[in-house]
């Protein structure tokens, strides 16, 4: 297993910094399909969703809204 959150000091970041870091890590992932139609389909769907969010940033919900929903629906 690679380094942990504590090893990297990520546990010391505030929520906003953790989200920013997660988005940077996500953006660094190579989504080029490596094999089969499933990966190609997933790649297209991720691109579609990213484009949709770019076109209408208010179409999504915030992490805080997700947390409230999860807390209300265990």
Image (cartoon, rainbow, N blue to C red):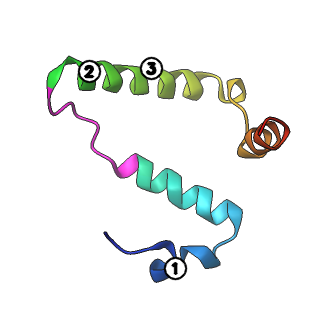
Spatial CA span between label 3 and label 1? 34 Å
Mark 2: few, some, or many residues within 10 Å (few <14, many ≥20)?
Answer: few
Q: Residue at x 50, y 73 (%)?
A: 5
Highlighted range, magenta: 27-35
| Residue behind mark 1 | 6
Q: Position of residue 15 (x, y in %)?
A: 69, 63
- Between 50 and 42, the residue placed more toward the observer is 42
Q: Quadrant of the N terminus?
A: bottom left
| Quadrant of residue 53 within the rendered picture | top right
Which residue is situated farthest in the front direction here? 74
Residue 15 falls left or right of residue 28: right
Residue 37 falls left or right of residue 57: left
- Residues at marks 1 and 2 touching, judged by CB atoms closer than 8 Å: no
Q: Is residue 71 above or below residue 48?
A: below
Q: Residue at x 65, y 23 (%)?
A: 56
- Between 10 and 56, the residue placed more toward the observer is 10
Earlier sequence position, callout 1 versus callout 2: 1
| Residue behind mark 2 | 38
- Between 17 and 74, the residue placed more toward the observer is 74
Q: Name the secondary structure under disc 1.
A: helix
Earlier sequence position, callout 3 versus callout 1: 1
Residue 37 falls left or right of residue 21: left
* Magenta stretch secondary structure, dominant: loop
| Quadrant of residue 65 within the rendered picture | top right
Q: Is residue 31 magenta?
A: yes
Q: Is residue 24 above or below residue 55?
A: below
Earlier sequence position, callout 3 versus callout 2: 2
Mark 1: few, some, or many residues within 10 Å (few <14, many ≥20)?
Answer: few
Q: Name the secondary structure under disc 2.
A: helix
Spatial CA span between label 1 and label 2? 34 Å
| Residue behind mark 3 | 48
């Amino acid at each position: 297993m690679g380094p942990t959150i504590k090893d990297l000091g990520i546990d010391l970041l505030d929520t906003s910094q953790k989200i920013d870091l997660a988005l940077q890590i996500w953006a660094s992932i190579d989504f080029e399909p490596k094999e089969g139609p499933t990966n190609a389909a997933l790649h297209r769907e991720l691109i579609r969703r990213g484009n949709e969010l770019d076109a209408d940033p208010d179409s999504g919900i915030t992490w805080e809204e997700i947390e409230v929903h999860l807390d209300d629906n265990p």
